[in-house]
Amino acid sequence: MALMKDSLWNLVNGTAVVPSQTEAEKYAKYVARKHRALAIVVLSIEPSLLYLLEDPQDPVVVWNKLAARLQKKTWANK
């Protein structure tokens, strides 16, 4: 919900469009938003689970690692 509140969810779920690096201002804003999304996700995790993330650099990768490890894939949960 914190990501949705700050309009950052698309950076975590992988649907954000990455601007070209030639558009310096747009790209800089994208990188800043990406770092903010990553920080929200990492800071929301129980410290004892941070080992799962290794070296967090990309919010999409972090989210997918957490989902693969913690989200139950049983039929009942779907």
Image: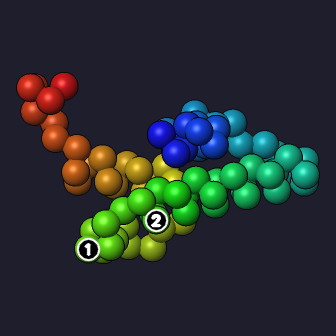
Horizontal side, residue 1 vs residue 15: left or right: left
Spot occupied by residue 22 in the image (x, y as percentages of width and height): 90, 50
Q: Residue at 15%, 29% (x, y): give it.
A: 77
Seen in the image, is 68 located left or right of residue 35?
left
**3 shown above or below 66:** above
* Mark 1 residue type: Ser
Task: State the mark number for residue 48.
Answer: 1
Crowd class of label 2 (few under 14; some 14 to 19; many from 20; radius 10 Å):
few
Q: Dividing the picture into quarters, in which one does residue 76 lie?
A: top left
Residue drawn at (22%, 51%) of the image: 70
Measured from the top left, where is residue 2 in percent x and y?
Answer: 52, 45
Under circle 1, the secondary element is: helix
- In percent of width and height, residue 67 lies at 30, 47
Q: Is residue 51 above or below residue 6?
A: below
Q: Does the image show residue 60?
A: yes
Classify 10 Å Cα crowding around label 1: few (below 14), some (14-19), many (20 and above). Answer: few
8 sits to left or right of 19:
left
Can see residue 14? no
Question: Considering the numbered disc 2 on the image, is that residue within a helix, a strand or a loop?
Answer: helix
Q: Residue at x 72, y 56 (%)?
A: 31
Q: Earlier in the sequence, mark 2 or mark 1?
A: 2
Q: Looking at the picture, which amino acid does disc 2 mark?
A: Leu
Reading the image, the residue beneath label 2 is: 43
Instruction: Judge whether 8 appears above or below 28 on screen.
Output: above
Q: Foreground: 33 or 56?
A: 33
CA gap between label 2 and label 1 equals 12 Å
The colour scheme of the drawn protein is: rainbow
